């Protein structure tokens, strides 16, 4: 039976993701869980979010990522009015990139 979706429906999945200990484990888990197309979409939306957070304009983002203006708009709405997930992650990945000498 299909039911409506609620944030609580992701509890077990979130716990599974948090249990992963390495990038390789995460990559393998996502490869098992998602289709190639889904992973490409996730990667594209994440890159769009990073570029938007850096103040890049839609046309630059479209040419760099291949994302449609509709996708960029949806990601922008998430950045502006979402649950704050991007705000939690971005400082952490930037800090790690700096520590790893990638920035």
Image: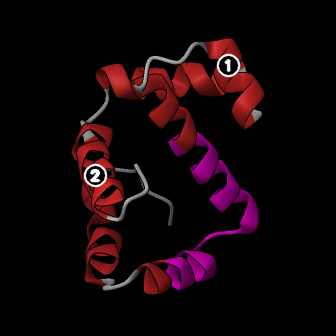
The magenta stretch spans which residues? Answer: 27-46
Residue with the most extreme front position:
101
- The answer to whether residue 62 is left or right of residue 100 is right
Closer to us: 94 or 42: 94
- The answer to whether residue 40 is left or right of residue 80 is right
Answer whether residue 40 is magenta in the image. Answer: yes
SS state under label 2: helix
Most frequent secondary structure within the magenta stretch? helix
Q: In the rendered image of this protein, does residue 95 appear above or below residue 68?
A: below
Q: Residue 21 placed where, x, y %? A: 31, 85
Label tally: 2
Q: In the rendered image of this protein, does residue 2 appear above or below residue 22?
A: above
Q: Quadrant of residue 8?
A: bottom left
Q: Residue at x 74, y 66 (%)?
A: 36
Q: Residue 48 placed where, x, y %? A: 56, 34
Residue labelled with disc 2: 7
Q: Residue at x 37, y 27 (%)?
A: 79
Q: Residue 66 placed where, x, y %? A: 77, 33
Q: Quadrant of residue 63?
A: top right
Q: Residue at x 26, y 36 (%)?
A: 83
Visual colour scheme: secondary structure
Q: Which mark is residue 60?
A: 1
Q: Residue 51 placed where, x, y %? A: 51, 30
**For discs 1 and 2, the disc positioned in front in the rendered view:** 1
Answer whether residue 54 is magenta in the image. Answer: no
SS state under label 1: helix
């Amino acid at each position: 039976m299909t039911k409506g979706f609620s944030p609580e429906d992701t509890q077990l999945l979130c716990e599974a993701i948090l249990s992963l200990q390495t990038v390789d484990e995460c990559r393998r888990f996502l490869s098992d869980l998602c289709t190639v197309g889904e992973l490409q979409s996730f990667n594209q939306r994440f890159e769009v979010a990073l570029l938007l957070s850096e103040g890049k304009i839609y046309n630059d983002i479209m040419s760099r990522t291949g994302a449609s203006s509709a996708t960029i708009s949806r990601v922008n709405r998430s950045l502006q009015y979402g649950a704050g997930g991007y705000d939690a992650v971005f400082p952490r990945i930037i800090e790690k990139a700096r520590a790893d000498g990638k920035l």
